[in-house]
């Protein structure tokens, strides 16, 4: 990649930041060049973010219709899945899955609820709500 | 606060942190040099590690390889500390900063508020330097940011003690003695040998063989669901290759820069020619990324076999390249 070919496409995903890439200058030497982004990166980053957002939106609809607990929504909103939430809380995956159901969630003792809330970076009360 | 600390922008967090740390302690070291001397370039396809259901594809050695690699090869005196309790970890950081130390930290990316929201994923092996504190804020030199940033105490605590895969456990590290000037020729030779060996290793998941295996997996991607899963799968590969902290082309340009610099430093001109060849290979990786992105967006018809073909061609190019690198390394007069 030549220095003048370094993309400066103003990716929304970089939110105004510039990232450092290496490119060949006119003297043939590679050097660090700040880049405002390349559309290719934006496409794949947005794809991953949108996949997570879609999961969160679907979980939100399920929580509102009573098919699943608010925990499922908050899990996806924090860009986690069952695997990660189980690692972060130190709970077995089957227990996490049980708490994703409204019945399992309703039986959660306050201590466990706090553990989930802490792992997700929200308050215990916020965990009950779907905003 | 360590006086005269100079922040510098880097493409990769770990090589950026180590080069800044060494420069601060008086050893001239570019990011590319730190990356290359630690033999950080690689390729690995690890299907048993899944992130959001997609396999891990990496263009470099695993986290901490650069820190540990430089510690060993440069004979650095470094201290590493992890903590069971977050308050103890924060107190220790404060004490070191108050003593004027420049401290490296391993953190999660997700909990750092200064990161762009779209880039905040649960990746726990990010590296940054802390060079001071003011009231409730830490003064941070994050190599992938253009300028120094600030981070509130509570946020930094969260980021340092995030759990899950590669949990940092509050890891902090610093130099206890200024580094001695190294023997560039000896280190360079060793570093080249290691990278050539890894890239040509007769193992199915790493190096050139890993690329071929990944090509086979791409070819077999099912299209029955309209290609939804296939698009996510190839998008994930490109994300690992081009997103945060690679310097483009899956670190190939960064490594080429190392080869150029090593050639200039040691006078071994053969490495210059190899650097140009690797830049061309890096361009091929960018073309692969572009072709994949066009398919993801539906500008071109989704064709996993066409991408697999490009990846095989890249594997063939890299095989020849690393064989040449290996020969050049052996021909390098002691």
Image (cartoon, rainbow, N blue to C red):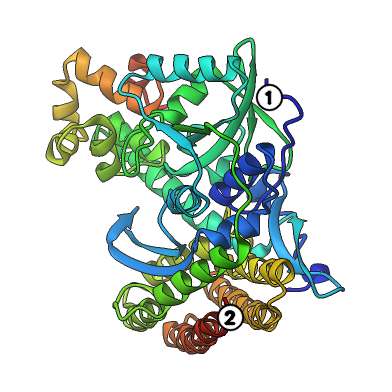
In the image, residue A114 sits, relative to residue B323, either above or below, namely above
Give residue B2's mark.
1
Give residue B332's mark.
2
SS at badge 1: loop
Q: Earlier in the sequence, mark 2 or mark 1?
A: 1
Give residue B136's mark.
none
- Residue B219 falls in image quadrant: bottom left
Chain bearing tag 2 is: B
The reply to whether dot 2 and dot 1 touch (C-beta < 8 Å) is no
**Image location (x, y in percent) of residue B253:** 64, 69
Q: Across the whole image, how many numbered discs are drawn on residues?
A: 2
| Residue at the limit of the structure toward the top, as seen here | B135
Left or right: B187, with B268 as reference point = left
Left or right: A92, with B28 as reference point = left
| Front-most of residues B200 and B294 | B200
Image point (69%, 80%), residue name: B276
SS at badge 2: loop
In the image, residue B162 sits, relative to residue B287, either above or below, namely above
**CA distance for labels 2 and 1:** 40 Å
């Amino acid at each position: 990649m030549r220095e003048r070919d370094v993309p400066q496409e103003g990716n929304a995903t970089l939110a105004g930041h510039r990232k450092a890439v290496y490119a060949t200058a006119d003297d043939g030497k590679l050097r660090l060049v700040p880049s405002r982004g390349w559309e290719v990166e934006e496409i794949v980053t947005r794809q991953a973010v949108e996949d997570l957002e879609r999961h969160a939106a679907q979980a939100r609809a399920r929580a509102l219709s009573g098919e699943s607990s608010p925990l499922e929504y908050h899990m996806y909103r924090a860009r986690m899945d069952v695997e990660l939430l189980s690692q972060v809380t130190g709970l077995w995956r089957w227990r996490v899955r049980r708490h994703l159901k409204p019945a399992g969630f309703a039986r959660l003792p306050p201590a466990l609820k706090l553990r989930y809330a802490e792992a997700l970076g929200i308050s215990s009360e916020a965990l009950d709500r779907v905003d | 606060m360590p006086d005269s600390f100079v922040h510098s922008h880097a493409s990769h967090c770990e090589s950026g942190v180590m080069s800044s740390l060494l420069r601060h302690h008086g050893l001239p070291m570019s990011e590319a040099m730190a990356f290359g001397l630690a033999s950080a370039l690689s390729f690995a396809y690890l299907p048993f590690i899944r992130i959001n259901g997609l396999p891990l594809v990496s263009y470099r050695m695993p986290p901490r390889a650069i820190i540990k690699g430089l510690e060993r090869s440069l004979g650095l005196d470094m201290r590493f500390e992890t903590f069971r309790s977050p308050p103890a970890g924060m107190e220790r950081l404060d004490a070191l900063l108050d003593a004027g130390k420049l401290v490296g930290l391993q953190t999660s990316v997700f909990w750092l508020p200064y990161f762009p929201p779209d880039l905040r994923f649960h990746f726990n092996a990010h590296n940054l330097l802390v060079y001071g504190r003011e009231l409730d804020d830490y003064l941070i030199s994050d190599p992938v940011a253009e300028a120094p940033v600030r981070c509130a105490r509570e946020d930094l605590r969260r980021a340092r003690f995030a759990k899950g895969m590669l949990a940092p456990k509050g890891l902090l590290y610093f130099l206890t003695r200024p580094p001695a000037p190294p023997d560039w020729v000896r280190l360079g030779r060793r570093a080249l040998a290691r990278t050539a060996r890894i890239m040509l290793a007769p193992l199915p998941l790493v190096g050139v063989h890993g690329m071929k295996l990944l090509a086979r997996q791409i070819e077999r991607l099912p299209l029955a669901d309209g290609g939804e899963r296939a698009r996510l799968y190839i998008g994930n590969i490109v994300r690992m290759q081009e997103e945060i902290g690679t310097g483009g082309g899956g670190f190939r340009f960064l490594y080429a820069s190392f080869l150029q610099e090593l050639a200039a430093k040691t006078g071994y001109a053969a490495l210059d020619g190899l650097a140009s060849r690797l830049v061309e290979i890096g361009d091929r990786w960018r073309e692969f990324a572009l072709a994949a992105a066009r398919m993801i967006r539906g500008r071109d018809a989704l064709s996993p076999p066409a991408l697999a073909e490009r990846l095989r061609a890249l594997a063939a190019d890299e095989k020849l390249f690393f064989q040449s690198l290996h020969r050049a390394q052996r021909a390098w007069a002691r």
